Image (tube, rainbow, N blue to C red):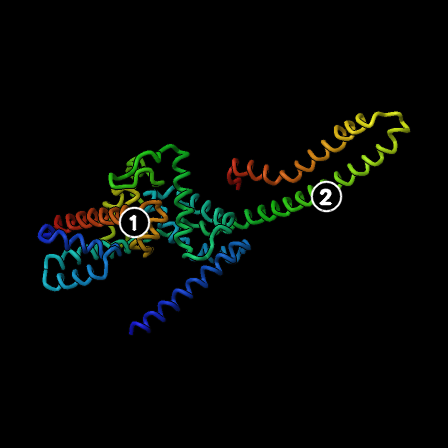
Amino acid sequence: MQIDSARHPSFCALIDKSLAGAATPQEEQTLREHLATCAPCAEHQEATRRVVAGLEGFSFAPGPGLDHQVLAAVALRARQLETNRVRRRQMGWGGLLALLLTAVGSLAASRLGSLAGPALHLDPAQMRFGLAAFWITPSLFICMLLLLQPTLHAGLSSRKGFSL
Amino acid sequence: MFAFETIFENIGAETVSTETQQIARGLRQRDLALLHALVEQYQYRLVRYLIYLLGRRDPVDDLVQETWLRVLERGRSYDGQSPFAPWLFTIARNLAIDSLRKRRIFSLDTSDSPDDDAGAPGVNYAESLALASNAPSPFEQAARTEDARWLAESLETLPAAVREALVLRFQEDLSLEEIAAIAGASVSTVSSRIYRGLAALRAHMQGAHHAN
């Protein structure tokens, strides 16, 4: 049966609007009053409700074993994330410790250099250069590497995507 | 009467809020028991949403798995202030778009309708998504009633954005604002998608009834 929706197009549009949840209370009231007296529009509403009800007539059962597969993948990924978290924490502490050792070592080397320099007939500028080149710079580089390693690792992992 | 309704509404809102906050807390702690419960509770709805979105069955299982892995990884970004389902569907939608983009079967350059927002992060649900084979569509396979069988024919011809709006509004019972947030579109765009979908399905169903 074709419904004469052209008869009251504005009310037919309002029926859709009402079902979509976009009608105002005032529009709902107007629609109710109209539907009480207009059979074609009431039929239009019934046809639309039947469409919406028809959408309930589908059954999209998940594929067999999908739940089990998902739960296994989630458990595996959770273990990976936990391992990564522990590793990142260890790296962080390692980096901080290395930073501390660099500072203490630099201070000690500086003091030792100032004492040993005159005895070895070395220029203080040479001592400072040697200290910076062979102790402070490599140590700071290693510290930075340890501290930034989790970030670098995360960046590489995200580029690889999931590896389950 | 009004006061009672308000009280009940408040109680309902608080219950939902408590539940979502528990979910948010569990996701922050990567609580596997909670995730198992969520998978059981939302799996069917997630599968249904993805089938409506893609109009295909074959990539759905992989996307479902990736969605839950993403929930595990990014669970800290769920704040528990809003319902869980829209957040879950947003993740699934983004993954579906990424997956399809990798296969180069659609681009983000064009929209599915002249009334769509220009530049909205929607999808060109071009007919490239339509089934190329003669195999029954997932809608035909899932139809359990006579009306559903009629609707199935029409559903597979609708643009995916329209199907998405229909499933989120009438199956998930989400508000237009929630649907708009998921689809990355304006409320008016979502409304017009729903109207288009209803009109197409109604016309198809009436035609089928008329033919019979």
- Label 1, secondary structure: give it: helix
Q: Residue furthest right?
A: A119
Tally the numbered discs: 2
Residue occupying image coordinates x 14% and y 64%: A33
* Amino acid type shown at disc 1: Val
Q: Which mark is residue A40?
A: none
* Amino acid type shown at disc 2: Leu
Residue occupying image coordinates x 10% and y 63%: A37
Residue occupying image coordinates x 51% and y 54%: B27
Chain assignment, label 1: B
- Label 2, secondary structure: give it: helix
Q: Which mark is residue B187?
A: 1
- Visible residue check, residue B132: no
Front-most of residues A25 and B121: A25
**Relative to B165, does residue B33 appear above or below in the rendering?**
below
Q: Which mark is residue A97?
A: 2
Chain assignment, label 2: A
Q: CA distance from mark 2 to mark 1?
A: 54 Å
Image location of residue B204, percent across then percent down? 18, 47
